[in-house]
Image: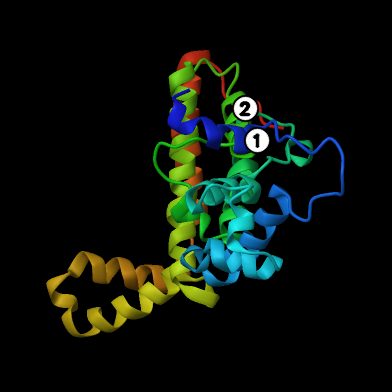
Amino acid sequence: MKDEHAELVRLLWGPHPQPARGPRPKLDLGRIVRVAIGIADPEGLAEVSMQRVAARLGVTKMALYRYVPGKSELVALMVDAAIGPYPKAEGRTGGWRDRLEEWAHRLFEVFRRHPWALDAAVGPRIMGPGELSWMEYAVSALDGTGLSGAERMDAAALLVNHVRGIAHQAHAAGPSGAPETQLAVFLGDLMHVHGERFPALAEALASAARDAGQDQAWEFGLRRVLDGLAVLVDERTGRPDPGP
């Protein structure tokens, strides 16, 4: 691990040295991170600052720097605390498809509770044990499917991208959490006036309204991703996923 990442690795993975004697410290990493998450959840990541976290903790900003070098390291700690660890003891014990479906639903709920993590948990970066436990579970769910290690990791990434995309849309929709319904309203107004220019879209929108087929992107997309994986697994193993 490169030297510039050594401190972040220590913060995420430990060990975290404790004073051998004397009074118990007023602060610890866990408390600092919980306060920061308490700001980010209702207000967004942009509202998290070392100064504001310190104020909520009743200490000076300089006191925080004894525990966390800066905001970027704090955000990494927040992401790991908010996302993980994966509660695999409560997960399904069926076949790979059931396990990944449960995994995706749980990850969606994490992003629903902590929408700021959608922007924070992106790109190549050092991840902590909590977040990596989710990847571990997804990759291990595909053990015995005939998929290579790279394919199992790509399958997990594909599912994460679907979860993230729908979670982004739901967050952008606001309290209603119904992005497709809102989009249908906007498109409906436009198609009422300009539908002749977009006949396929106008017909599809009208059909969705008649069949109550809106707000299905989450389940529809998740099932199609899993269907595609099932085809590949069947090719490799010559048998379908046994399910629960």
N-term mark: 2 or 1? 1
Q: Which mark is residue 63?
A: none
The picture places residue 87, in percent across and down from the top left corner, at: 73, 41
User: Could you say which quadrant of the image residue 184 lies in?
Assistant: bottom left
Is residue 182 or residue 192 the one in the foreground? 182
On the rendered structure, is 107 left or right of 190?
right
Q: How is the image coloured?
A: rainbow
State the residue at coordinates (71%, 35%).
16
State the residue at coordinates (45%, 72%).
173
State the residue at coordinates (73%, 34%).
17
Q: Which residue is mark 1?
A: 99
* Cβ–Cβ under 8 Å for marks 2 and 1: yes
Looking at the image, which residue sits at the far left?
197
- Kindly report the distance in space between the C-alpha atoms of the residues bearing marks 2 and 1: 6 Å
The picture places residue 211, in percent across and down from the top left corner, at: 45, 68
Task: Specify whether residue 211 is in view.
Answer: no
Is residue 135 or residue 216 the one in the foreground? 135
On the rendered structure, is 224 left or right of 193?
right
With respect to residue 80, does 175 lie above or below? below
The picture places residue 219, in percent across and down from the top left corner, at: 52, 53
Q: Say which amino acid is labelled 1.
A: Arg
State the residue at coordinates (59%, 33%).
132
Q: Which residue is mark 2?
A: 141
